[in-house]
Structure formats: C-alpha cells, structure tokens
Amino acid sequence: MASYSELMEQAQKLMAQAEQARKDELSAVIADIKAKMKQFGITAADLGSSTGGKKVGKSKSNAAAKYRGPNGELWAGGPGRKPEWVRSVLASGKSLDDYLI
C-alpha cells in the first residue's frame, strides 16, 4: 500500500496533468470559436460582449506584476490565494523564480 506522501505526490502530478489538459482543450476550443466567428463575420459585440473581446480582470491590487505565467498570466505575488497557474507550477516541482518578470 502506498504511503500518504506518495499518494499526495501522485495527486499533485495528476492535478498538474489535468490543468495542462484543460489548457490544451481550452486553446483548441478558442481557436475553433475564432475560426467560426471569422467564417460567419461574427464580432464580440454580436455576442453581447461589453468589453469588445478584452478580458476584464477582477484584480483588487494595483501592485506591479512580478511573475508572468506560461500563458502570459500576470501575478504580483501578494498575500492571498495563489492563481491556478501558480499552484500548477509549484505542484509540478518548478520554481516561481523561472517566471519572474
């Protein structure tokens, strides 16, 4: 029978794999949506987007970003809950120093 630490390590690896699979699938879905929007001449406004296709963050901080994630995500590194990409990086055994801006 596996020990608790071995099971936790396996769980962390599986969570990192699941997050990567989600990102890969998300990229494919976004590419498909963009292709269909172009094919049919659909704009973000047609979809009821008030942001014109730009992402609107819910950041409460005005602190300058210290880290850039693998997909361009920014994080200031402050207190509070870490973003999912940071948790994935740490779970995979990598260092946040690799993502310093």
Image (cartoon, helix red, strand yellow):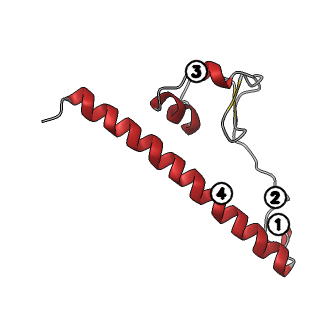
Local SS, label 3: loop
Residue 53, disc: 2
First-in-chain label (3 vs 1): 1
Local SS, label 1: loop
First-in-chain label (3 vs 2): 2
Q: CA distance from mark 1 to mark 2?
A: 6 Å
Q: CA distance from mark 3 to mark 2?
A: 30 Å
Q: CA distance from mark 1 to mark 4?
A: 18 Å
First-in-chain label (1 vs 4): 4
Q: Callout 3, which amino acid? A: Pro
Residue under circle 3?
79
Q: Residue furthest bottom?
A: 40
- Foreground disc of the pair 3, 2: 2
Q: x, y (%) of residue 83?
A: 58, 35
Q: Residue furthest left?
A: 1
Residue under circle 4?
27
Q: CA distance from mark 3 to mark 4?
A: 29 Å
**Can you say whether 10 is above or below 93 in the image?**
below
Residues at circles 1 and 2 in contact by the CB criterion of under 8 Å = yes
Residues at circles 2 and 4 in contact by the CB criterion of under 8 Å = no
Q: Callout 1, which amino acid? A: Ala
Q: CA distance from mark 2 to mark 4?
A: 16 Å
Q: Callout 2, which amino acid? A: Gly
Residues at circles 1 and 4 in contact by the CB criterion of under 8 Å = no
Q: Choose top left, top right, bottom left or bottom right for residue 52.
A: bottom right
- Foreground disc of the pair 1, 4: 4
Other-residue count near label 4 (Cα within 10 Å), few / some / many at <14 / 14–19 / ≥20: few
Residue under circle 1?
44
Q: x, y (%) of residue 54?
A: 81, 52
